[in-house]
Amino acid sequence: MKSFKDMKWVKWVLGTVGAVVAGGAIMMGGVIIGYPAISQLVGLAVAQSSTLWNNVIDAAKGDSQTSGILGMSPYLWNGLTFDRQKGTSGSANVNLVGTVTPADGQANPTTLSQVQSFPMVFNTVTWDRIRAPSGDGLALTGLLATATLVHNGSTWDRADGVSAANNTATTSLGVMQVAPISTWRVTNSANAGTPSASKASGGGTVRHVTTCISISVGAAATAQPVVQVNLRDGGTGAGTIIRSWQLAAPINSSASADLCGLNESGSAATAMTLEFAAATAANTQASVTVSGYSTP
């Protein structure tokens, strides 16, 4: 058994050796936990590569440092790896998107978060700056497409304005086509009778609108006295008389009336009729024709 004094001597030797080893580790920039344990942070290093370490530096070191900086500043993901976020030289300003100079004919942006501070319009290929009014005869670049467009059955064209070129053009590009409303027509005739042309009811809320009428009477050996022709909001012999006309024809002569540009609207779900109010004279030929359109 060793004496108490011998044990104290062994502890003193071990402590001295541990202190020397720890001091050597501090001088080499590393930390070794020996005996007794080191209880204070004695230095930090950051790996530049798998074999090279650099002492970590603080802000008092100044600008333009290239090593010893911990990777704690913002990094940007490029889809595969992280890259250091770039800043402008000698400034704390951060340039995320690079230089962007306003210009016409600018391509669609591919840089994330690019923001333009001016309004632009797309011309189907590139972006142009919107222009303020500065007189007539402006170029198309930068003008909003707020003009009237007409459909040609496949695409949209700009409606043509008055110009020498448009007035002498032989094509209809950009010309608005106004087609007439589809119409119906009913006709009837009789010899020594009472002609009646009636457009049957459309049912529901459909209304018939008369736009044209045509009436005629031709007398032979017997003269045709004055006879009335009625436009009725209803069927044959029924309904309100909207308008009336009178015709007469001497022996071996005829009389007629053709009127268009009317806009006589009937009632919903009601027939529209043009008819003679009485039978014509013997051997007298008469006819009526009514035409128009219907609203739903």
Image (cartoon, rainbow, N blue to C red):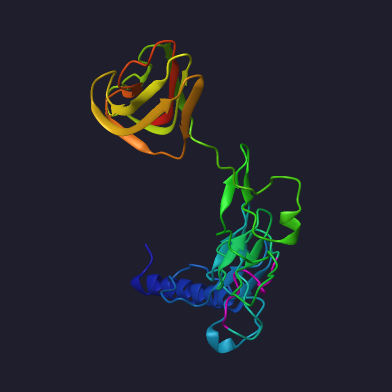
Foreground of the two, 296 or 104: 296
Foreground of the two, 193 or 98: 193
Foreground of the two, 102 or 246: 246
Quadrant of residue 199 within the rendered picture: top left
Residue 237 in the image, given as x and y percentages of width and height? 26, 19
**Which residue is at a point 54% across and 78% down the rendered structure image?**
23
Magenta residue span: 92-104
Q: Quadrant of the N terminus?
A: bottom left
Q: Is residue 249 visible?
A: yes
Q: Is residue 206 visible?
A: no
Left or right for 99, reference 256: right
Q: Quadrant of the C terminus?
A: top left
Whether residue 133 is situated above or below residue 183 in the rendered picture: below
Residue 252 in the image, given as x and y percentages of width and height? 51, 19
Left or right for 230, reference 262: left
Left or right for 153, reference 105: left
Residue 86 in the image, given as x and y percentages of width and height? 63, 72
Foreground of the two, 55 or 267: 267
102 drawn magenta: yes
**Which residue is at a point 47% across and 37% down the rendered structure image?**
260
- Give the dominant element type of the magenta stretch: helix, strand or loop: loop
Please count the marks in the image.
Answer: 0
Which residue ends up furthest to the left in the rendered image? 239
Whether residue 224 is situated above or below residue 28 in the rendered picture: above
Whether residue 252 is situated above or below residue 92 in the rendered picture: above
236 drawn magenta: no
Residue 219 in the image, given as x and y percentages of width and height? 46, 18
